[in-house]
Image: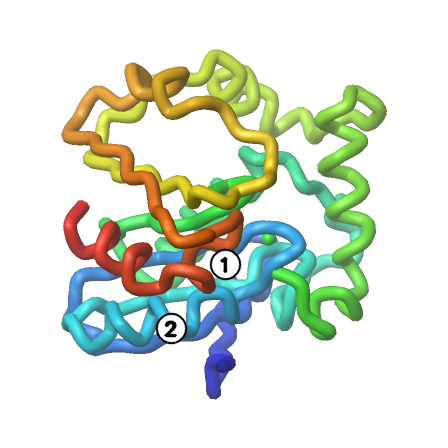
Amino acid sequence: ARFDKIKQVKAGILDIGYAEVGPQSGRTVILLHGWPYDIHSFTESAAILATKGFRVIVPHLRGHGSTTFLSSESPRNGQQSALALDVIALMDALKISKAIIGGFDWDAIFERSAASLDHPDHVAIVIHNYRWRLGLAEGEPQYDVLEKQLATAPVINVPAITLEGDANAAPHPDPSAYALKFKARYSHRNLSGGIGHNLPQEAPQAFADAIIEV
């Protein structure tokens, strides 16, 4: 299944493509895809949330789908702080003051599709992220303060639910290793039945239920 319509909005340094389902008046949920994934990982879970009255926004992250840089001079940067600021810019552009954030994989943040693989910025951004994480490429100075904050693994002071599939083969820490990082209401759920890494696509109801309950 795929989203039928993609909207565009200028937000920060990007022209962001995003899918939107559910009533405009509903409580806003923003769903962030991982890599090498795309927005269509969320088609089923977004539909479930929309039927429950949520307004669901699913953006193509930088380097994916119809999201492009407004300037050809902008560095094709894949730092985590840059991606976070993209989401804040999207919220500002859409006049969203508060939202539930759901995601998986790297950000709990990227899904493979022909559109993603054909995107002119995709390879540069993906390569930069991995080179930067290995210390082989420099980040942008304007993100230094945020990167230093993120490097300290700051506590999370909003309600949260984390999910883990019983067949997740991706490297991941035991939940007990990060449980104390959540200072507000928090729970962790293990999903059985051969659920792997792509939770919203493999277990859309459980993923949507966590969004609803958080």
Judge from the rendering whether residue 192 lies leftward or rightward of residue 186; answer left or right.
right
Q: Which mark is residue 44?
A: 2
Q: Residue furthest bottom?
A: 4
Q: Residue furthest right?
A: 136
Q: Which mark is residue 193?
A: none
Which dot, 2 or 1, sits closer to the camera? Answer: 2
Q: How far across and how far down the image is residue 78, in percent?
A: 67, 41
- In-front residue for pair 99/93: 99
How was this image coloured? Answer: rainbow
Q: Amino acid at mark 2?
A: Glu
- Mark 2, other Cα within 10 Å: few <14 / some 14–19 / many ≥20: many
Q: How many marks?
A: 2
- Relative to 190, say whether 59 is above or below: below
Which quadrant, please, contains the C terminus?
top left
Q: Is residue 111 visible?
A: yes
- In-front residue for pair 208/129: 208
Q: Is residue 85 visible?
A: no
Q: Residue at x 52, y 42 (%)?
A: 168
Q: CA distance from mark 2 to mark 1?
A: 26 Å
Q: How far across and how far down the image is residue 68, in percent?
A: 66, 64
Q: Residue furthest front?
A: 193
Q: Residue at x 17, y 61 (%)?
A: 27
Q: Which residue is mark 1?
A: 11
Q: Residue at x 37, y 66 (%)?
A: 57
Judge from the rendering whether residue 129 lies leftward or rightward of residue 145; answer left or right.
right
Q: Secondary structure at mark 2?
A: helix
- Relative to 128, say whether 198 is above or below: below
Q: Residue furthest top?
A: 152
Q: Residue at x 44, y 42 (%)?
A: 166
Q: How far across and how far down the image is residue 6, in percent?
A: 50, 80
